[in-house]
Image (cartoon, rainbow, N blue to C red):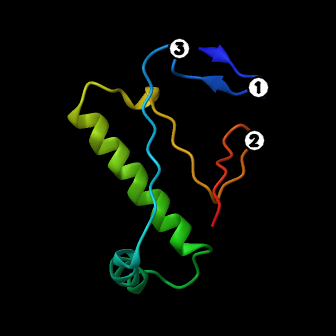
Amino acid sequence: MQQNGDGSEDKADGESAFALVIGNSKALWRPFQLHLKGLDGQQQDPLNNYTEEHVNAAVQAACAATSVTLDKTQVYFAHLSTRGKIVAIQV
């Protein structure tokens, strides 16, 4: 693995890379509302948690269906601001 200037590690090691930006539409709201009914109401940031859960599950499913191993993936979310994992998104 290569070290980036900010101290994070580059998992690509010169291999091919693929990036995917996921947005949402009004189609998100009905499944999200159904999801909320199953929560106790005490969850902080339920939409962010819902998004992370479903995106991570999709990445795991994609890896299981291909030759890509999960340890070669990097998933970043615009709502998180972890150093070395910041995604600039304009709303």
Pick the residue in front: 86 or 21: 21
Q: Which residue is mark 1?
A: 7
Q: Which residue is mark 3?
A: 13
Q: CA distance from mark 2 to mark 1?
A: 9 Å
Image quadrant in which you'd find residue 71: top left
Residue occupying the point 45% across, 15% down = 15
**Which of the two labelled residues, at mark 2 and mark 1, occupies the earlier sequence position?**
1
Q: What is the quadrant of the C terminus in the image?
A: bottom right
Which secondary structure lies at badge 1?
loop
For the residue marked with disc 3, what is the amino acid? Asp
Q: Are marks 1 and 3 in contact (CB under 8 Å)?
A: no
For the residue marked with disc 2, what is the amino acid? Arg
Residue occupying the point 40% across, 81% down = 29
Q: Is residue 33 left or right of residue 87?
A: left
Number of residues whose C-alpha sits closer than 10 Å to that of mark 2, classed few (under 14), some (14–19) or many (20 or more): few
**Which of the two labelled residues, at mark 1 and mark 3, occupies the earlier sequence position?**
1
Residue occupying the point 41% across, 54% down = 55
Which secondary structure lies at badge 2?
loop
Q: Which residue is mark 2?
A: 83
Residue occupying the point 25% across, 36% down = 64
For the residue marked with disc 1, what is the amino acid? Gly
Residue 72: percent from left, percent from top: 45, 26
Q: Are marks 2 and 1 in contact (CB under 8 Å)?
A: yes
Q: Nearer the viewer, mark 1 or mark 3?
A: 3
Residue 84: percent from left, percent from top: 71, 37
Total marks in image: 3
Q: Is residue 24 left or right of residue 83?
A: left
